Image (cartoon, helix red, strand yellow):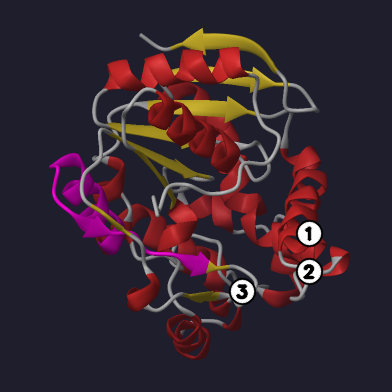
């Protein structure tokens, strides 16, 4: 079975997908799609893979979420650094070196396996269950903080939400994550020559969009328990600081920005350079 062949939820219009596909094909072997939670990055990447199959090309979709550290590794961080480190999401809870290895293998035409993360189990699947691909004509890496720079240390002093105020009052967790972002992720960012930014209306819409994602996840796994609404509302607070930094910096970083309305309809495109 083609490991890139997954279920496609209702997504972007075919004409838009075709336009992005041509943009990606002209950008090189690796194409990056960035946007906050719920902007439709995963759906777009799967639509690009489906269009690639129609055209006889192997498009391999990857997500930064595929490279989360496993549950045990994050529990160790929670004990040694800060309890909030045990929750997946922020920079520092991924394996950027593994991401570099996978992207390099695909970009160089070498066979490789693709890590998979089970979000309901909150753990990485065993390597024996990772799908294998023999080659890629195009790699699409999507993620919610691709190429986002770290914040200056002075910006970390004041809590940004209730989670930081009540559970990270000394700033230990957010300083650790910011340091990880500055130190561990640039080698991966250097492997992303072209960045498309799906620009939503702002962070205020993220809780609603993230809850919609969780409902879709639950509907696809009726026998398992996904996050509840209160859990999702807490979860998005883990992402808020870096998300707001992303919204400030992506317009100047991305090669192409697609502005979305509150229903994820593309309404405007702008280019850098």
**Image disc number at residue 170:** 3
Question: Which residue has dot 2 on it?
Answer: 222
Residue 107 lies in the magenta-colored region: yes
Do labels 1 and 2 touch, CB within 8 Å?
yes
Q: Quadrant of the N terminus?
A: bottom left
Q: Identify which residue, 127 or 210, lies in the foreground.
A: 127
Does any portion of residue 233 appear in the rendered image? yes
Residue labelled with disc 1: 219
Magenta segment: 98-117
Nearer to us of marks 3 and 2 is 2
Report x, y in % for residue 22. 39, 14
Q: Residue at x 49, y 45 (%)?
A: 145
Label located before the other in sequence (1 or 3): 3
Label 3: element kind: loop
Picture coordinates of residue 126, whole percent (x, y): 39, 79
Q: Are marks 1 and 3 in contact (CB under 8 Å)?
A: no
Which element is circle 2 on? loop
Query: Residue 153 location in percent, x, y?
Result: 47, 54
């Amino acid at each position: 079975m083609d490991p890139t062949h997954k279920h496609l939820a209702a997504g972007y219009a075919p004409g838009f997908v075709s336009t992005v596909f041509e943009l990606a094909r002209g950008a090189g072997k690796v194409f990056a799609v960035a946007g906050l939670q719920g902007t439709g990055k995963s759906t777009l990447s799967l639509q690009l893979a489906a269009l690639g199959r129609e055209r006889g090309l192997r498009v391999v979709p990857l997500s930064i979420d595929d490279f989360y550290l496993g549950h045990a590794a994050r529990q160790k961080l929670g004990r040694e650094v800060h309890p909030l480190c045990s929750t997946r999401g922020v920079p520092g809870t991924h394996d950027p070196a593994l991401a570099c290895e996978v992207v390099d293998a695909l970009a160089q035409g070498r066979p490789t396996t693709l890590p998979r993360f089970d979000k309901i189990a909150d753990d990485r699947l065993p390597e024996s269950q990772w799908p294998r691909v023999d080659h890629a004509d195009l790699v699409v890496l999507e993620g919610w903080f691709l190429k986002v720079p770290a914040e200056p240390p002075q910006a970390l002093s004041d809590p940004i939400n209730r989670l930081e105020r009540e559970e990270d009052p000394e700033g230990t967790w957010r300083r650790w994550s910011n340091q990880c972002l500055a130190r561990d992720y640039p080698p991966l960012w250097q492997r992303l020559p072209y960045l498309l930014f799906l620009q939503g209306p702002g962070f205020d819409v993220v809780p609603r969009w993230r809850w919609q994602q969780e409902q879709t996840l639950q509907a696809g796994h009726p026998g398992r328990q996904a996050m509840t609404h209160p859990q999702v509302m807490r979860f998005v607070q883990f992402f808020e600081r870096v998300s707001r930094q992303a919204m400030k910096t992506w317009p100047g970083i991305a090669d192409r920005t697609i502005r979305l309305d509150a229903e994820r309809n593309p309404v405007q495109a702008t280019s850098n350079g």
